[in-house]
Amino acid sequence: MKERVFITLTNGFKDKLFRLAKRLLVSNEEAEDATQEVLLKLWKNKKKIEEYKNVEAFAMTMTKNYCYDKLKAKETGNLKIVHSNYKDERPSLQRQVEAKDSLDWVGKIMNDLPEQQRMIIQLRDIEQYDNAEIADMLGLNETAVRVALSRGRKKIREELLKKHNYGVV
């Protein structure tokens, strides 16, 4: 595989790799390092790339595993998963404050979700993968992905409703 072909192939999904790494590692620098490391591994094994049905899914799985290894190597007590991919169209200051508050609460609620539900919500709702692709990436069946996604969304919805209705979560 030529360098130009490799770059064309990976340009389609390298931003997704970065977003997933950032979601897991929080730090921009660590996410950039993780993305670069995964792309480097893909380049080193470029002869085997054609054997994979879905290179993007394989790269996402590599990124997930790399990030988990990084988190295991560190003391994870000071690392948190934070959602920062949301962009508001700035309709009014009040709406901006409300949206930011809701987003902060979603991030806090997501931190309390089991790791598998967090990952599935990230891949489905933020990265826009379908359930079959997520099942392949995480080594689960589609039913388990649907159930975890449903439970995670339900928990987020319930906790947000509590916050908005009672003012306290």
Image (cartoon, rainbow, N blue to C red):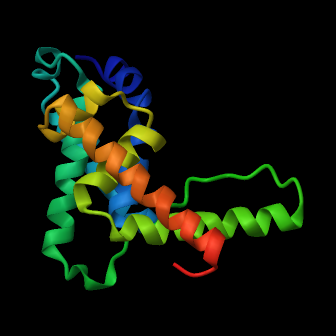
Residue 82 located left or right of residue 91: left
The residue lying toward the viewer, choosing from 84 and 113, is 113
In front here: 62 or 142? 142
Task: Find residue 104 and report its image quarter.
Answer: bottom right
Please state the total of marks drawn on the protein image: 0
Instruction: Give the residue at x 34% y 17%.
Output: 5
On the image, which quarter does residue 135 sit in? top left
On-image quarter of the N terminus: top left
Residue under the point 14% across and 70% down: 72
Residue at the image point whose x is 15% and y is 19% from the top: 52
The reply to whether residue 48 is in sight is yes
Q: Position of residue 140 (x, y in %)?
A: 13, 37
Left or right: 14 as drawn, with respect to 147: right
- Residue 142: horizontal and vertical position, in percent? 21, 30
For the question of whether residue 35 can be seen, the reply is no
Q: For this rendering, which residue is in front, 128 or 23?
A: 128
Q: Is residue 130 above or below residue 68?
A: above
- The foreground one among 102 and 2 is 102
In this picture, residue 48 sits left or right of residue 149: left
Query: Can you tell which quarter of the image residue 45 is in?
Result: top left
Which residue, as the protein is rendered here, is positioned at the far right? 92
Q: Residue at x 40, y 64 (%)?
A: 110
Q: Give the percent coordinates (x, y) of residue 30.
A: 35, 64
Up the image or down, 149 lies above or below 142; here it is below
- The percent position of residue 136, horizontal first and vertical second, equals 18, 30
